[in-house]
Amino acid sequence: MNRRFRQLDVFGSEGGRGNPLAVVLDAEGLDDAAMQDFAHWTNLSETTFLLPPTDPRADYRVRIFTASTELPFAGHPTLGSAAAWLDAGGRPRGEVVVQECGAGLVEVRGDGDRLAFTAPPLLRHEPVEPALRERLVAGLGLSAAEVREAVWLVNGPQWIGLLLADAETVLGVRPQPALLEGLELGLAGLREADRGCRLEVRAFLVHDGMLVEDPVTGSLNAGLGQWLTGTGVLPGSYVAAQGTVLGRAGRVHVERDGADVRVGGRAEVLVSGTVAL
């Protein structure tokens, strides 16, 4: 049957410079295998499927698939799914969009020409154990002095956040996949304030010997925002750049409001139509 479909550019500073997302809006009747097969076919970092909520507080339910597995939560699929739902005529029950996903309920609100989600709580947040830290330093081709801190930032994905010496160090990293198998890594380094962004970010996933660099990563930036604003490394409001090495121009807006951290950016519909599924 034909189902409504959107493809969006998320977190881009301009169209086509962020992270693409495919969204199937009418996913009722699709089983797990059909969703996974379609996500594999799109060959994007994530594809989402929107369904009626099971929680009465939610406006819709989303299932998030990479090309090979399902995720309980991810950032750019959250913003992109909300934008697709609104573009297709969705209207929230309250003042904000409430999304139901594997990690629970996530609020998404308008922020000028951007959308922003409230970061879910970190499920694991502690320093990386010394042996693993040594492995990370070697696998990233860095010296121990260039890694200022390394902490777990688990919020669905199993991110390890590494604060490096500066933005130039982040941009110069050339990972060695054989030493980083099975890890999901987020690198961050402070940029000069007069360059418009305070933080340079890169995200790497290494599985089955293959290294993938994600263009712009909402879940990672959520964890980094909770960590770095909470410890005073960054102010309560800042902009992060990501995707620079890939020729992208991702911009992620992070803002702390009390105990909450909101992660925002643009989510622009580039393709609108139907898909036969």
Image (tube, rainbow, N blue to C red):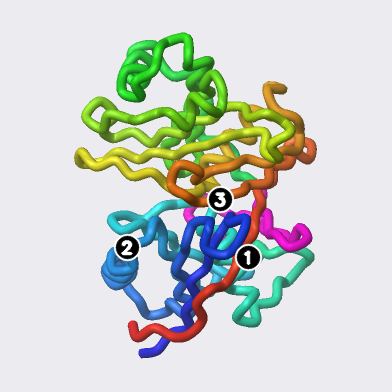
Could you tell me if the residues under marks 3 and 1 are in contact, i.e. CB atoms within 8 Å? no
Residue 261 visible, this orientation: no
- At mark 2, the secondary structure is loop
Q: In the picture provided, is 100 more to the left or to the right than 257?
A: left
- The circle on residue 249 is 3
Q: Quadrant of residue 255?
A: top right
Point 57% across, 35% down: residue: 200
Task: Magenta stretch: give its range.
Answer: 99-118
Q: Please name the predominant secondary structure of the magenta segment in the image.
A: strand
Q: In the picture provided, is 230 more to the left or to the right than 81?
A: right
The x and y percentages for residue 242 are 53, 43
- Which residue was labeled with disc 2? 43
> Three-letter amino acid code at disc 2?
Asn
Given this view, does label 2 or label 1 mark the residue nearer the observer? 2
Compared with 271, 180 (above or below) is above
Of mark 3 and mark 1, the one earlier in the sequence is: 1
Q: Residue furthest bottom?
A: 1
- The circle on residue 58 is 1
Give the crowd class for mark 2: few <14, some 14-19, many >=20 residues within 10 Å: few
